[in-house]
Amino acid sequence: MSNTDGSMNARSNCSASKSSSTPHNLPFPIHGSTIECHGDDGIETTGDIAAPLHVSTTFVSGALESCGQVYSRLNTVTRTRVEALLGAVEGGQAITYSSGLSAVTALIHCIKPRRMYVDAGYHGVRAAFKLWSERGSLGNEKFEIFTLEQCKQLFEQRESQPRTERTVWHPVNTKEERALDLIWVESPNNPYANVADIEWFSELASRTGACLAVDSTLSSPLGQRPLEHGAHVVMHASTKYLAGHSDLLGGVLIVHHSLSDVLACKLLAERTIDGAVMGNLETWLLLRSIRTLSLRVRRQCQTASIVVQWLEKQRIDGRKVKKVHHPSLESHPNYSTAARYLLLPPATFSFELESESQAKSFAQSLLLCTRATSLGGVETLIDWRHMHDTSVSSALLRVSIGLEESEDIIQDFEQALNKAE
Ligand SMILES: *Cc1c(COP(=O)(O)O)cnc(C)c1O
């Protein structure tokens, strides 16, 4: 298949996946969980209530029943449905990928940043940026990863211009005009649930000409609205809350509507060539999962708050808990920033015991909750983070709250805390 074919089809796919929150041309707008259940109505018309699982990679050319599908690397009807839903839920245009990291890599390859700011957070994302810089440096190009201090200096150096005259980010701006190409912010972040002041980064983006991307995985589309605070792109590892059942790998970029033609279409065309699409089964599982997104995430966040309060009480009572990293607590450094940005308290957070051995024995003593990495699923998981990311204290445990009853999780934590030595 030629490149021209690829990008042509990607372009038609581009308009097909533009999301609307009024499927079926309803005479009224729909909201929240209604979008999760109906935001893709009318895209596939088979009479099935549950979405059919399609396995075909190729389709009859030009037939009405083919719903515009050509070849499954270019487009599939289930992917179009998922992207319509995710776009409507986050408020932009969604492009899905085979994993969270392939979504990050796709944005890096599309923007080709030479000067970038990468927030502390998920170790895999930091590794993706490092790999990009190392590969680029082989061709003698100069890559710079800016520190927050350097960003603050840039912020001060570059005058704020009246809004209308600001350098609005655009992929065709020449690199020479930009002080920064890409700002990558993970908020709330791994594993401290630190919350970024997205509007400050948005101002930095407009002063430097950078694209602002927010990894919003830990809050899910329900927990915050980065596009409304000035982000150009939102990324989710759909492996986590969007999938919600620990049974698929996927990633998604959601591009602000104002950049649909310049950025979303370019990403779609490049995805067709790079080939990092979700598999049919994963796409179908994701569609099934989005139907219950609000139901799951709201409950997980609510339970997390209860467990966090219990952990904080143990800390105050001097029972082995040294720190609880959750932005709903006044002791958290981003308590007030969180109040500005977060619509729900994060269901993933961490806490520290007094020592590495206490943390390990706590995790090993759990009877109900499971020791495993990853997050966002229906089962509560505890992760000894130091194993994956040595920049994190060896006394820290990350918690991803599932759908169990809060009192059962607390009973399990209570007995494990008693055994922790
Ligand atoms: C898991 C995760 C990723 C990477 O997603 P994969 O699907 O594992 O590639 C990126 N960012 C955050 C915040 C994550 O939690």
Image: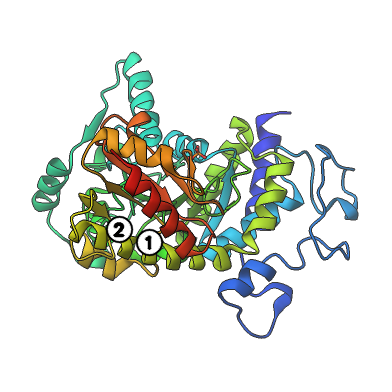
Residue 311 numbered mark, or none: 2
Residue 386: % across, % down: 32, 32
* Quadrant of the frame with the C terminus: top left
The residue where tag 1 is placed is 307
Which residue is depicted at the point 46% across and 59% down?
Answer: 256
Residue 270: percent from left, percent from top:
56, 37
Instruction: Specify whether tag 1 is near ligand 1 (CB below 8 Å).
Output: no
Q: Amino acid at mark 2?
A: Leu
Element under label 1? helix
**In the shown orientation, is residue 104 left or right of residue 327?**
right
Q: Is residue 17 visible?
A: no
Type of residue at label 1? Val
Q: How are the colours assigned in the image?
A: rainbow
176 or 313, which lies in front? 313
Q: Quadrant of the N terminus?
A: top right
Instruction: Specify the quadrant of the image occupied by residue 356.
Output: top left
Left/right placement of residue 201 relative to residue 303 reads left
Are dots 2 and 1 in contact, CB under 8 Å?
yes
The residue that appears at 68% across and 85% down in the rendered structure is 27
Residue 124 spot, x, y in % from top left:
40, 33
Q: Is residue 91 above or below residue 78?
A: below
Nearer to me, 134 or 270: 134
**Residue 326 spot, x, y in % from top left:** 29, 58
Q: CA distance from mark 2 to mark 1?
A: 6 Å
How dense is the environment of label 2, judged by Cα within 10 Å: few (below 14), some, or many (20 and up)? Answer: many
Q: Residue at x 38, y 30 (%)?
A: 388
